[in-house]
Amino acid sequence: MSPRYAFFISLLLTSSMTMAGEAPEKISFPSLDLQDGQTVQLDAFWFHASGNAATAPTVIALHGCGGLYSSRKGHEQELNARHHNMARLLQENGYNVLMPDSFRPRGTNSICSSTYKSRDISTNNRRLDVQAALQWLGRQTAVDAKNIALLGWSNGGSTTLNALNAAHKAAGKDDLYPKAAVAFYPGCQGYLKARPAYRLAAPLLILIGAEDDWTPAAPCVSFEKMLAPSPVKVSVFPDSYHDFDAPDLPLRKRMDVPNGVHPGQGVTTGSNPVAKELAYKEMLLFFKQHLSTQ
């Protein structure tokens, strides 16, 4: 598939998703996480699956370090384009979608410019958000509670890996786990030497760029080998950087990001429409294989 043709298909897909599907509801529910001794009340967008089925499988989608919302002036209360397009894609393929906001309820819009060690919001905090989301979904009549998946980008992808670790030191006998999960360009390095050793709770698909210098592919490949024969697959896309599935993002060096392969030297982000289309097809096939749709 040529880049021009793939880009044209992407535009058509985006246009059709914008025009189709029900508008989301704004809902809220309490996280299991506490901040200064107080429960964090999470806001979220709730998309109902297209069609007339009484219940449907559901995807919990976890934003990256830049947050859930648009950064365009005057559109700060709206989902950014990637989250909006993904919600519509999943909705039109028969899935409910829950998109919780882990940042604004904790007083920030983004943590991309903070070093990993200085961040006030960790994947452990967000793991508790996932537990709360799973509990909330279990109470919804429109949800097939046996068919819930996680989907995360970058920091949300790392949170997905954290939420799937059945050996997590904070995991309890009452913890809930999704039936499957997809992580776009997560950070895998920290899980390679986790103690106790990482134990995968559900099938996992990792989608990452070969040239990613923010969350590199090599540790994820090692993560896959370490967990064998557990059901984890890593797909590495050539000529692709961090955010390769972002719509219309020119390739650029972000000097505001202090983390990455070369700390302090910036990281590269940008779209690859061909890789995006291949990754989204693989994601949809993965969900179809692991979640029942009516």
Image (cartoon, grey):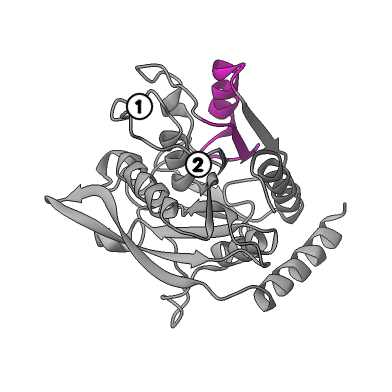
Q: Mark 2 points at which residue?
A: 214
Rate crowding at label 1 as few (under 14), some (14 to 19) or many (20 or more) other CA atoms within 10 Å: some
Q: Can residue 170 be seen in this view?
A: yes
Q: Which of 35 and 2 is in front in this view?
A: 35
Q: Is residue 117 left or right of residue 277?
A: left
**Quadrant in the picture for residue 245:** bottom right
Q: Nearer the viewer, residue 164 or 268?
A: 164
Residue extending farthest left: 37
Q: Quadrant of the C terminus?
A: bottom right
Q: Residue at x 32, y 49 (%)?
A: 114
Sequence-wise, the earlier of marks 2 and 1 is: 1
Task: Using the image, determine if residue 221 lies above or below residue 77.
Answer: above
Q: Which residue is drawn at 38% across and 68% down?
A: 27
Q: Give the range drawn in magenta.
A: 202-230
Q: Which amino acid does label 1 sit on?
A: His
Q: Is residue 115 visible?
A: no
Residue 128 image offset from top left, x and y in percent: 32, 44
Task: Using the image, determine if residue 231 lies above or below residue 266.
Answer: above
Mark 2: secondary structure: loop
Q: Is residue 136 left or right of residue 221?
A: left
Task: Using the image, determine if residue 194 lies above or below residue 214.
Answer: above
Residue extending farthest bottom: 74
Residue 251 image offset from top left, x and y in percent: 62, 56
Residue 71 image offset from top left, x and y in percent: 45, 71
Mark 1: secondary structure: loop
Residue 79 covered by magenta stretch? no
